[in-house]
Image (cartoon, coloured by chain):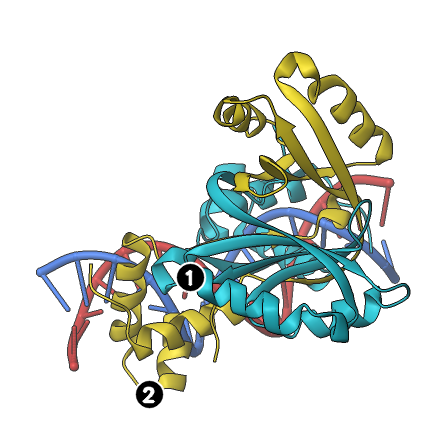
Chain colours: A cyan, B yellow, C red, D blue
Amino acid sequence: MGKLDKLDFLILEYFQQDGKCTYSQIARKLGVSEGTVRKRATKMRKDGVFDFMIRINPVKVGYSVKAFIGIHSQLGKQHEIGQWLKTFPQVIYIASYSGYHDLILQAYFENNEALVHFVNTELTPENGIEGIDVSIQLKQYKDSISYLLS
Amino acid sequence: MGKLDKLDFLILEYFQQDGKCTYSQIARKLGVSEGTVRKRATKMRKDGVFDFMIRINPVKVGYSVKAFIGIHSQLGKQHEIGQWLKTFPQVIYIASYSGYHDLILQAYFENNEALVHFVNTELTPENGIEGIDVSIQLKQYKDSISYLLS
DNA sequence: CCTGAAATCGAACCGGA
DNA sequence: TCCGGTTCGATTTCAGG
């Protein structure tokens, strides 16, 4: 699985700007053939470099409360808890961390009551959780996916 | 801007699974016409419900360190700091929060040194930052964009 | 719904290390 | 030969009336 070259990165940049742009459009802008863009994109997808998706505005589909929850877990339970929490549809992100919290998750809720209910019924000592810190998002300044800089 | 109905949500679900699937494919699976799917998708896009994008695997493009940084800012400086930090390409997410931290950001770095450098040179008292908590991601269990389902 | 324009896809082809 | 890029034609999708 070879490294990515300049052309691969250019293709990624175009798709990043607009996930719906076509191989042909990119090919024209880059001055190469459609087949080249298509073959490289297909290869990168197969290699797990990227995939096509959509980004949904959570507010528009009824989820207006976004929260981060930092978790202190019982010793040795992080993995188990991570596997368990990822099954909740509200939880869109969860990972284990080195730092103050053992696990950090990001979740969306329809309202504050739904958040409170989740916290009170799921993030309990019986489930291996020793403590949590809940932060509710007030204002989002940036949410990008461009690791591709400058 | 009317509400979304069952069909809209089904369309979103298909696009969520594969952002490259075609209107026709979805139409066939749902038993409606291609035009219907296209018209609804176009409307939803225009209404800001969703947009097409790609998700890049950061590790494959050279960013192996993912960190959350919680920030304590000087009183009244949150907004200014948020606006400023969002200009960094490494910072892929930043928002203000109610909770223990005033701001939470998510960033990718090529390695630990890059992270340390960023923290030491940017997140300083001179920039209005009183304190930070850095957490480095160990293992990611889930990173989805599906607020939908069920 | 229908039609022309455009994009896609697979496979074959080509040219230089 | 191998690897990458290109070309070509059949098929599918797209966009607008």
Considering depth in this image, is B5 or A100 the residue closer to the camera?
A100
Kind of residue sitting beneath label 2? Gly
Chain identifier of the residue bearing label 1 in the image:
A
- Observer-side mark, 1 or 2, equals 1
State left or right for residue A110 relative to residue A149: left
Label 2 crowd bin: few (<14), some (14–19), many (20+), radius 10 Å: few
Q: Which residue type does callout 1 highlight? A: Asn
Residue at image coords 36%, 85% = B30
Disc 2 element: loop
Instruction: Kindly identify which residue carries mark 1.
Output: A111
Q: Label 2 is found on which chain of the structure?
A: B
Q: Do the residues labelled 1 and 2 touch (CB within 8 Å)?
A: no
Residue drawn where x is 28% and y is 75% of the image: B5
Residue B112 placement (x, y as % from top left): 85, 35
Which quadrant does the N terminus of chain B fall into?
bottom left
- The image quarter containing residue A45 is bottom right
As drawn, the label of residue B31 is: 2
In the rendering, at what x and y percent does residue B10 appear? 39, 77
Please give left or right for residue B30 compared with residue B83 in the image.
left
Near-viewer residue (B75 or A24): B75
Residue B72 image-quadrant placement: top right
At mark 1, the secondary structure is loop
* Residue B39 appears in the picture as rendered: yes
